[in-house]
Amino acid sequence: MIWRCSAGAELFSLMALWEWIALSLHCWVLAVAAVSDQHATSPFDWLLSDKGPFHRSQEYTDFVDRSRQGFSTRYKIYREFGRWKVNNLAVERRNFLGSPLPLAPEFFRNIRLLGRRPTLQQITENLIKKYGTHFLLSATLGGRESLTIFVDKRKLSKRSEGSDPSANSSVVTLETLHQLAASYFIDRESTLRRLHHIQIASTAIKVTETRTGPLGCSNYDNLDSVSSVLVQSPENKIQLQGLQVILPEYLQEHFVQAALSYIACNSEGEFICKDNDCWCQCGPKFPECNCPYMDIQAMEENLLRISETWNAYNSEFEESDEFKLFMKRLPMNYFLNTSAVMHLWTMDSNFQRRYEQLENSMKQLFLKAQRTVHKLFGLSKRCHKQPLIRMPRQR
């Protein structure tokens, strides 16, 4: 009996201790929850912070903005055309078991017509002007289009409840939106027209359409011959190769020289490099091919504008209040030597600051004029007539 009483007392004390611990934990949880409710902003804000995983995700940012506006559901449907890789077989099969290059017969015929020792003009007329200087080595084709519908279920349900049951055709439900999204790729224009009508009539949805890349490229049979569907982007750059790699060895060096003359000299001369200097050796019909008159004229006009700006700065300085006030303080009844003028100069701090402003502007303008003159000398060094250059000088 004594053992039962002692055991009962011990059990009662343990139960009391457990209730006290549970009550303390409950109060602590309530206190923490109250504090967190006061300081909490949004459970998803950390995702968009500087260290969050979606810091630079534009799609997630748009989703959060729509969510804060009340749009709780998002339907998104998209398709991406196969990003076909186009490779030129002429380069890949060049040394494959001695197989011939898969080139066009007309291209072979033009190479044979050139002979063993063609001139640069013949290469330009028969190859470069017909086929260019490079060919497509590899590229990616394709495109992507998507339709996104943000839905505010609360507004949608209110609209459905307040509508007339006899006009079920005009009631917009989630099932209706799902069917419209599914029919986007079947009949795009009518689907968008219906969705835009719903968006205007009700604020329950927001529709966004995204189309990237040249679409419709799956309609072409031969993608290698279609240049308008090439996708040019930073992560996917079109790779080109010089045409000389598929020419016979005896033509490669002459082709490169003809291509440089065609691009750099505009087919008016032969491109020559010697002693770290390159120029065009002009043909008899174009004696001034090394003299870009249009560029030289633009540089001369730029120098003229710099001189006009230089004079305008001086005129503004002479018309300034600081300059006029300094001139009024000078004595007019006797001559001043240099030391007297310097003494009056040092006594006028406002005038000194105004002159420093003029001096800084003049320095920047003079550096700009120097750069223009250097470019002008570089462009006109092989011209028969050298330009007349006058640099602005300080007064």
Image (spheres, rainbow, N blue to C red):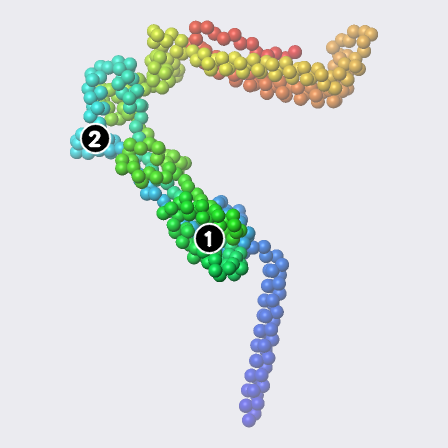
The residue closer to the viewer here, 358 or 76, is: 76
Q: Give the residue type that dot 1 points to.
A: Arg
Judged left or right of residue 152, residue 39 is right
The residue closer to the viewer here, 287 or 335, is: 287
Residue at the spot 41% in from the left edge and 51% down from the top edge: 181
* Image-quadrant location for residue 384: top left
* Image-quadrant location for residue 261: top left
Residue 236 place in picture, x, y as percent: 37, 37
Does residue 157 sit above or below 53 in this rendering?
below
**Would residue 240 be seen by someone viewing this image from the given angle?**
yes
Residue 84 place in picture, x, y as percent: 31, 40
Q: CA distance from mark 1 to mark 2?
A: 51 Å
Residue lying at the far right of the rendered structure: 333
Q: Which mark is residue 102?
A: 2
Q: Which mark is residue 309?
A: none
Residue 124 place in picture, x, y as percent: 29, 17
Q: Are marks 1 and 2 in contact (CB under 8 Å)?
A: no
Label 1 sits on residue: 74
Residue at the spot 53% in from the left edge and 9% down from the top edge: 389
Residue at the spot 52% in from the left edge and 13% down from the top edge: 300
Does residue 208 sit above or below 375 in this rendering?
below
**Would residue 206 be seen by someone viewing this image from the given angle?**
no
Judged left or right of residue 384, residue 302 is right
Counting labels gives: 2
